[in-house]
Image: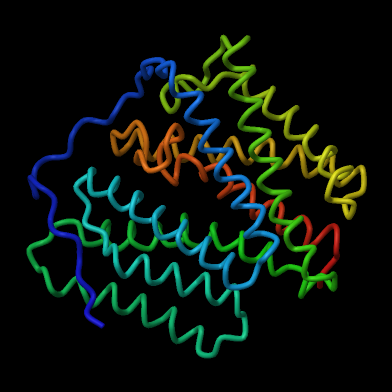
Amino acid sequence: MSVTQDPAPPAVGAPPAAPAVATMKPAAPSWALPLRIISGLLFVPLLILLAKVGGIAFWYFVALQASLGLIEFYRMMRGRGLRPYRRLGIASAVVMLWVCFRPHTPHVAFLVTAVLLLVLALELRRPEARQRVEDIAVTCFGVLYVGWLSAHFVLLRELPWRAGTGYEEGAAFVLLAFFVTWSCDTGAYAFGRLIGKNRPWAQISPRKTIEGAAGGLVCAMAAAFIARAWFAPFLAARDALALGALVGVFAQVGDLVESLLKRDARHDDSSDLIPGHGGILDRFDSLYFAAPIVYYYLLIVVFRVP
């Protein structure tokens, strides 16, 4: 398989532009909220269905999400004058997801080594490049940021094999991560709109407020208790409290991290793929940080898997 690199961006060799300063985005148009609601109503039943089915169907869903997310990420990095190996990065992420789905895949160490050596060797094809280290680094970072963090959706769905529960329980593990995270996002948005005044992260995300962050944390903790009573009886009360607090913090950190990347690349949204929501990265940024938190908490604390 031949691996090609994205074509060079314009103005190669031009001096780097001045650092971007975050500015307040214009208020969303009146149709944005209804569009967000419609998109959510269409996506949530599909997510529930795929989570319940599990197996290869859910793996394909995560692989599609990760591939689209990497396309958005590498497009943003090209806006910074970098030249990531997009196809190789996407292929590496898909292989990583497969290994998480089928952990007994042979020769995993060989595959990882081959990818690294291939990225390094491909740099020999363009001796005129001036940002070799940055191009290599951003290719690998994309695989880890989007690919590896997305792999925790697969790990959550396949966790019953390690936790000794019924395979159908994996749907609850996945939905727990989504439910608590989206409750946090919704709470942060609502409280920020209603009472938000203090903006300590104005250079990263001008609309994020302390009041909104506190509201998101409270809603995440409340959502964890609702989930415990609704579909996650495996959580003790102390687990719901701890997990809600952890997700309430790290989900918002994930949102800020993606905002930081967008500001650095001078993008308002990662794309307009999802009506009313932006791109894949805009919709999954909080989940990239929350899903690992939920997975390792369940693995280590709740089920005590050695």
Considering depth in this image, is 268 or 50 the residue closer to the camera? 50
Q: In the image as oriented, which residue stretches furthest toward the bottom?
A: 106
Q: Residue at x 63, y 28 (%)?
A: 186
Q: Is residue 289 left or right of residue 139?
A: right
Q: Quadrant of residue 41?
A: top right
Taking 64 as reference, is 85 left or right? left
User: In the image, 283: left or right of 243?
Assistant: left
When the figure is inspected, residue 265 is found, relative to residue 62, above or below; the finding is: above
Q: Name the one closer to the observer, 8 or 184.
A: 184
Percent x, y for residue 88? 31, 70
In the displayed structure image, the side of residue 71 where residue 231 appears, left or right: right
Q: Quadrant of residue 230?
A: top right
Residue 149 location, x and y as percent? 54, 57
User: Where residue 13 sits in the image (x, y, percent)?
Assistant: 8, 48
> Is residue 95 shown above or below 239?
below
Q: Nearer the viewer, residue 251 or 122?
A: 251
What's the residue at 50%, 31% (across, down)? 36
Residue name at image x 42 percent, y 62 percent: 143
* Colour setup of the view: rainbow
150 vs 259: above or below: below
- Percent position (x, y) of residue 302? 85, 58
Residue at (83% x, 38% y) in the render: 226
Question: Which quadrant holds the C terminus?
Answer: bottom right
